[in-house]
Amino acid sequence: NSLFIHMKIHQGIFDHPCDFCEKKFKSHAELRHHRRVHTLEKPYVCETCNRQFSRHSTLVNHRRTHSGERPYMCTICGAAFKLS
């Protein structure tokens, strides 16, 4: 399924149109994420500060502000970062 969706990029197939604007997407999941721009839906909530996010990945990155986790490290000098 992932390969099928990916191949739509090369074939120029974007067959999931947004009901609110002119944009089209290659998968229903991408369209669902995009719709949140229009609906202002933010279903992912930080358990520590109650800040809300429209994408789970953004919440995961935000949690690092509370935990101090720095999972990305420079292989040359050892400096660590929250985001890649």
Image (cartoon, rainbow, N blue to C red):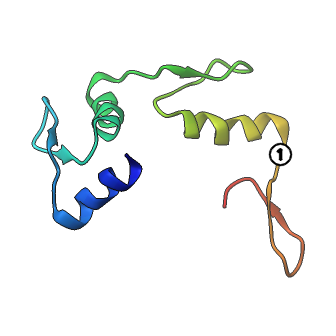
**Crowd tier of the residue under label 1, counting other residues whose Cα lies within 10 Å: few below 14, some 14–19, many 20 or above:** some
Report helix, strand or loop for mark 1: loop
Residue in view at x 89 percent, y 71 percent: 78
Which residue is situated farthest in the left direction here? 22
Task: Please say if 77 is above or below 63.
Answer: below
**Residue at horizontal 28%, vertical 42%?**
27
Q: Say whether residue 41 is left or right of residue 22.
A: right
Q: Position of residue 57 (x, y in %)?
A: 57, 40
Residue type marked 1: Glu
Q: Is residue 59 left or right of residue 20?
A: right
Give residue 12's quadrant in the image: bottom left
Q: Is residue 76 left or right of residue 49?
A: right
Q: Residue at x 31, y 51 (%)?
A: 5
Total marks in image: 1
The image shows residue 34 at horizontal and vertical percentages of 30, 37
Q: Residue 50 at what x, y percent from top left?
A: 64, 17
Q: Where is residue 38? Give x, y as percent.
A: 26, 28
Q: Is residue 45 above or below residue 22?
A: above
Quadrant, the C terminus: bottom right
Which quadrant holds residue 16? Answer: top left
Would you place residue 40 above or below residue 62 in this image?
above
37 left or right of 84? left
**Between 46 and 23, the one nearer to me in the picture:** 23
Residue toward you, 13 or 49: 13
Residue at 89% across, 78% down = 77
**To which residue does mark 1 refer?**
69
